[in-house]
Amino acid sequence: MTAPISSFTPGVLAHSDAARVGFAPRCARFSLRARGDLAPLEAALGLSLPTRIGQRVTAGERQLLCLGPDEWVLHAPERDGAAITAACAGVYADHPHSLVDISGREVSFVIDGPRGAELLTLGCARDLDSIAVGEGRRTLFDGATVILWRDGDTSFRLDCWNSFATHLFHLLDTGVRELAAESL
Amino acid sequence: MLLIHCPYCNETLPEVEFAYASEAHIARPAKPSDVSDEDWAEFLFMRSNVKGPLYERWRHIHGCGRFFNAVRDTVTDKFLTTYKAGDPRPDLSSLTEGLK
Ligand SMILES: [Zn+2]
């Protein structure tokens, strides 16, 4: 059964001694695509655009992750969304780019706990050790494209499309209990 | 599972992040309306189907999103190299030298 996404409320959704899965509060999310001279966009947004895939920058409450050679994802508080849209619109005429509001498209799970990294290996084929703390990557988790933000050794945020959230949570929820049931 | 090197991410990653995208270095005719039906069919449908090293396109669809090119041996499934889209086709002898 697919439950509507509104059935998740921010807070802890599942936890055990091994790991914990939470649902992050709503935020403003943007997909940014740009090439060429990035300086005007950087000035408009008040942050630098990292060019190495996986690299992140934080400026105040704005967080930005480089996903591809000309692609970034930007998270900010909801109240900041209009300012970001306006700032980029201001440089659009001279520096064409694409800024798309994807706030309604994606949600984030917060994964932590002593075996948080291990929990992610249930659905992710990638070697998580290749994502350094403070970096992020787009990858595949249990068949769905996700963005992983590694905030700590065992703490992650996982962005996914709304429509996959219930499906992904089922696996995470099972994993949280399964890891706790294992005797080490 | 195959591990594939993405020349944009500069990382070697599981194949599930990638999608195969057919043979590489097949140029679309600049003016399709000038091309005969036979030549257009040739462009659309005919591929070399080699047994051995094949120049092919891949896309890092669940990663950086980029198309790139690879040389893969269709017999062994071994990737001889990967390189960015637009880069010249690498010389085959330089890739297979170490394998002999
Ligand atoms: Zn890539």
Image (cartoon, rainbow, N blue to C red):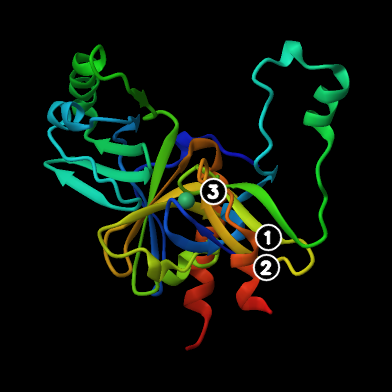
Judge by depth and name the residue closer to the eye, A120 or B29: B29
**Residue B39 locus on image (x, y percent):** 83, 24
* Residue annotated with mark 1: B72
Q: Are marks 1 and 3 in contact (CB under 8 Å)?
A: no
In the image, is the residue at mark 3 within 8 Å of ligand 1 by its beta carbon? Answer: yes
* Residue annotated with mark 3: B60
Crowd rating for badge 2 (residues with CA inside 10 Å; few <14, some 14–19, many 20+): some
| Quadrant occupied by the N terminus of chain A | top right
Q: Is residue A131 above or below residue A149?
A: below
The Cα–Cα distance between marks 2 and 1, rounded to whole angstroms, is 6 Å
The residue located at (33%, 30%) in the rendering is: A34
Q: Disc 2 marks which amino acid? A: Lys
Q: Nearer the viewer, mark 1 or mark 3?
A: 1
Query: Residue lying furthest bottom in this view?
Result: A184
Indicate left or right for A26 with A1 as reference: left
Q: Which element carries disc 2, helix, strand or loop?
A: loop
Q: Which element carries disc 1, helix, strand or loop?
A: strand
Q: Earlier in the sequence, mark 2 or mark 1?
A: 1
